[in-house]
Structures are given as structure tokens and as C-alpha cells.
């Protein structure tokens, strides 16, 4: 057997951890971070238990890797990520609840409002231009409004 494989030391695992952490930068999916954490943990374990054979080290590394990935997924199911900006890149949804002035009259339930630099098509009851309206919901790219 190769002498290197039979004489794995704690710092070898820390190098593996650094390599896995480096791979995490280039590979999407957040998987190598858990291999990195497991390798770092193996370095600590081997520092505390220096007589651990290489077979046990590899088996324990595999077990820790699988355990860390499963643990992370279970944690994420119980504690989901709360988005600070849930309407980011959903411009129409950002407009719900806001009040605007009609740019064009609503005729046959359709009209337009001017929002910043964009003209939006609106759906609501017929009324004259210049009236204040509130956006209540969104249907595709058409804003549903109500008169104020």
C-alpha cells in the first residue's frame, strides 16, 4: 500500500478542506462546503485520535459528509430562508397598494397610468384621466385598480 495513504495526518485533512472550499467557489449547489466541513472535522478528530487507521478515517469522512448534507437539508426545511425583498425583480407586484393618477381615461375597463418612466395598462371601472386609483392586484402585466 502507498505509504502516503497509510500515514494520513491531521493536516492532510485540513488541506482537503481547503481544496473542497476552493471548489465550492466554482461549483454551484453548495455541496463542497459540507465536504470541506467534514474534512476539517476529520482533521480535528485525527488530532485528538492520532492512531485512527486510514480505513476508519475514510469511512468517518464519508459518514460526516452525508450527515452534514442531510442535517443541512433538514435544517433548511424547518427554518426556510426569509427573503428580505420578496418582490425584487417583480416590478408589477411592487406596485400593489400604491396610489397613482390615471394618465389616460379608463374606457371599456382599460386605461393607463404613468409609473416613474413606464406606462402601465390598468383594468378597472371606467373613469376620467386625472383620477386617483389604487393598485389592488396584478393579472400578468395588467394592473387591477380601484378608484379612491
Image: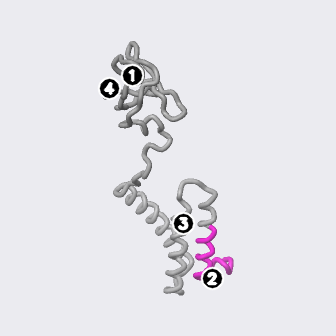
Q: Is residue 8 above or below residue 92?
A: below
Residue highlighted by disc 2: 7
* Residue 5, image quadrant: bottom right
Dot in front, 1 or 3: 1
Assess disc 2: are there few (<14), some (14-19) or many (≥20) residues with their C-alpha within 10 Å of its C-alpha.
Answer: few
Residue highlighted by disc 4: 147
First in sequence, mark 2 or 1: give its number.
Answer: 2
How far apart are the alpha carbons under marks 4 and 1?
11 Å
- Residue lying furthest front in this view? 130
Dot in front, 4 or 1: 4
Assess disc 4: are there few (<14), some (14-19) or many (≥20) residues with their C-alpha within 10 Å of its C-alpha.
Answer: some
Q: Are marks 2 and 1 in contact (CB under 8 Å)?
A: no
How far apart are the alpha carbons under marks 2 and 1?
74 Å
Magenta stretch: dominant secondary structure: helix
Residue highlighted by disc 3: 35
Tell me which residue sits at (51%, 67%) in the image. 62
Residue 90: x percent and y percent?
A: 47, 38
Residues rendered magenta in the picture: 1-19
First in sequence, mark 3 or 4: give its number.
Answer: 3
Give the numbered dot on residue 123.
1
Dot in front, 2 or 4: 4
Tell me which residue sits at (68%, 77%) in the image. 2
Tell me which residue sits at (32%, 27%) in the image. 146
First in sequence, mark 3 or 2: give its number.
Answer: 2
**Image quarter (top left, top right, bottom left or bottom right) of the C terminus:** top left
Amino acid at each position: 500500500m502507498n505509504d502516503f495513504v497509510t500515514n494520513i495526518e491531521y493536516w492532510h485533512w485540513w488541506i482537503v478542506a481547503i481544496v473542497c472550499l476552493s471548489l465550492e467557489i466554482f461549483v454551484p449547489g453548495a455541496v463542497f462546503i459540507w465536504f470541506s466541513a467534514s474534512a476539517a472535522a476529520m482533521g480535528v478528530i485525527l488530532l485528538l485520535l492520532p492512531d485512527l487507521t486510514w480505513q476508519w478515517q475514510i469511512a468517518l469522512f464519508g459518514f460526516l459528509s452525508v450527515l452534514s448534507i442531510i442535517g443541512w437539508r433538514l435544517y433548511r426545511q424547518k427554518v426556510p430562508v426569509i427573503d428580505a425583498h420578496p418582490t425584487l425583480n417583480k416590478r408589477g407586484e411592487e406596485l400593489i397598494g400604491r396610489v397613482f393618477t390615471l394618465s389616460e381615461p379608463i374606457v371599456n375597463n382599460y386605461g393607463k397610468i404613468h409609473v416613474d418612466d413606464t406606462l402601465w395598462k390598468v383594468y378597472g371601472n371606467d373613469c376620467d384621466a386625472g383620477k386617483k386609483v389604487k393598485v389592488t392586484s396584478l393579472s400578468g402585466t395588467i394592473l387591477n385598480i380601484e378608484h379612491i
